[in-house]
């Protein structure tokens, strides 16, 4: 099984979706956006959130490819933003844990 960083890095999505997600990353707010996407009262840790988001995104991508009437591009972009935002937060948390103390 691929680690989360590799799974995120190997996501291949249309350029427009990827660009929209990159533009939205700066405005990502975990307590607002993640809560809305996964509909959870208590937010999971970053790795668990990413796994759940990747599952949701996979389903959405299938809907996109199959031209499903249920597919919503705005929601897909929101999920991609959340994946990128959670990955960024997870990396930042990991860096804080290994920084040398003065």
Image: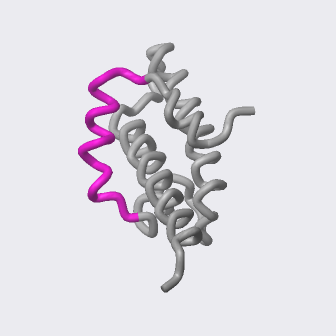
Residue at 56% x, 54% y: name it. Answer: 38
Residue in front for this viewpoint, 69 or 13 = 13
Residue 89, image x, y percentages = 47, 61
Quarter containing the N terminus: top right
In the rendered image of this protein, does residue 101 appear above or below residue 18? Answer: below
Please tell me whether residue 81 belongs to the stretch shown in magenta.
Answer: no
Residue that lies at the very extreme toward the front in this rendered image? 102
Residue that lies at the very extreme toward the top in this rendered image? 66
Residue at 27% x, 37% y: name it. Answer: 20
Residue that lies at the very extreme toward the left in this rendered image? 23
Q: Which residues are magenta?
A: 13-29
Residue at 54% x, 21% y: name it. Answer: 62
- Quarter of the figure with residue 88: bottom left
Please tell me whether residue 23 belongs to the stretch shown in magenta.
Answer: yes
Residue in front for this viewpoint, 24 or 1 = 1
Q: Is residue 49 left or right of residue 80?
A: right
In the rendered image of this protein, does residue 78 appear above or below residue 70? Answer: below
Residue 24, image x, y percentages = 28, 48
Q: Is residue 13 left or right of residue 101?
A: left
Display colour scheme? one colour
Residue 14, image x, y percentages = 35, 21
Residue that lies at the very extreme toward the bottom in this rendered image? 102
In the rendered image of this protein, does residue 89 appear above or below residue 78? Answer: below
Residue in front for this viewpoint, 62 or 50 = 50
Residue in front for this viewpoint, 89 or 51 = 89
Residue 31, image x, y percentages = 45, 69
Residue at 66% x, 55% y: name it. Answer: 48
In the rendered image of this protein, does residue 76 appear above or below residue 81? Answer: above
Q: How many marks?
A: 0
| Main SS of residues in magenta | helix
């Amino acid at each position: 099984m691929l680690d989360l960083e590799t799974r995120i890095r190997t996501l291949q999505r249309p350029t427009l979706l990827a660009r929209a997600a990159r533009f939205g990353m700066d405005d990502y707010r975990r307590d607002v956006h993640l809560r809305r996407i996964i509909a959870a009262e208590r937010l999971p840790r970053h790795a668990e959130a990413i796994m759940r988001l990747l599952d949701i995104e996979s389903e959405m991508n299938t809907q996109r490819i199959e031209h499903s009437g249920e597919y919503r591009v705005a929601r897909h972009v929101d999920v991609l933003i959340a994946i990128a935002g959670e990955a960024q937060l997870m990396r930042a948390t990991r860096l804080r844990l290994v920084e040398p103390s003065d």
